[in-house]
């Protein structure tokens, strides 16, 4: 029997979600190795941030990586997991990562709009192509 390929919109959304997961894990690594600048407090504050935010970023990264891989494996659970978690968890990951970059560069106000689009993009693609995905999913 011939295997039907995943819809293109679903593939794009799955890769986007995997990239969000990688960004979340990078945030954890960034907490492990904070920049050596005088503006950062260091010491106890860094340890507190690592203890509180470290497991959160690792969990978000694992959820995004798992949901993206489940979409590629054509599992309905991956679609549900992605649509439920991308909006509430994707925005903080991107805001935190670009907030870190904001310490080094000046971003225009339009950047907030682009950040919102980066989180809405996979969500919209998954919703637009859900009927085609349900046809090929198991």
Image (cartoon, rainbow, N blue to C red):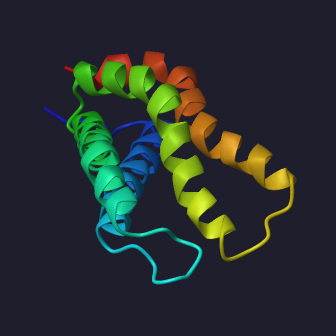
Quadrant location, the N terminus: top left
Residue projecting furthest to the right: 109
Residue projecting furthest to the front: 44
Quarter occupied by residue 35: bottom left
Location of residue 23 in the rendering, given as x and y in whole percent from the top left corner: 41, 57
Q: Is residue 63 left or right of residue 88?
A: left
The residue shown at (29%, 24%) is 136
The residue shown at (32%, 23%) is 81
Location of residue 53 in the rendering, given as x and y in whole percent from the top left corner: 34, 46
Location of residue 128 in the rendering, given as x and y in whole percent from the top left corner: 58, 23
Quarter occupied by residue 29: bottom left
Is 114 placed above or below 104 here? above
The residue shown at (39%, 57%) is 45
- Front residue of 125/44: it is 44
- Front residue of 87/95: it is 95
Is 61 placed above or below 128 here? below
The residue shown at (62%, 34%) is 120
Location of residue 121 in the rendering, given as x and y in whole percent from the top left corner: 61, 39
Q: Is residue 82 left or right of residue 69?
A: right
Quadrant location, the C terminus: top left
- Front residue of 36/88: it is 36
């Amino acid at each position: 029997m011939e295997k039907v390929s995943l819809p293109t919109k679903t593939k794009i959304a799955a890769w986007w979600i995997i990239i969000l997961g990688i960004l979340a894990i990078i945030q954890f690594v960034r907490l492990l190795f904070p920049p050596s600048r005088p503006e950062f407090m260091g010491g106890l504050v860094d340890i507190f941030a690592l203890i509180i935010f470290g497991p959160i970023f690792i969990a978000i990264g694992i959820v995004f990586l798992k949901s993206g891989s489940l979409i590629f494996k054509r599992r309905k659970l991956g679609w549900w997991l992605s649509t439920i978690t991308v909006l509430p968890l994707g925005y903080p990951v991107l805001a935190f990562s670009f907030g870190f970059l904001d310490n080094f560069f000046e971003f225009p106000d339009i950047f907030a709009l682009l950040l919102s689009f980066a989180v809405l993009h996979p969500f919209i693609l998954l919703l637009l192509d859900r009927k085609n995905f349900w046809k090929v999913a198991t």
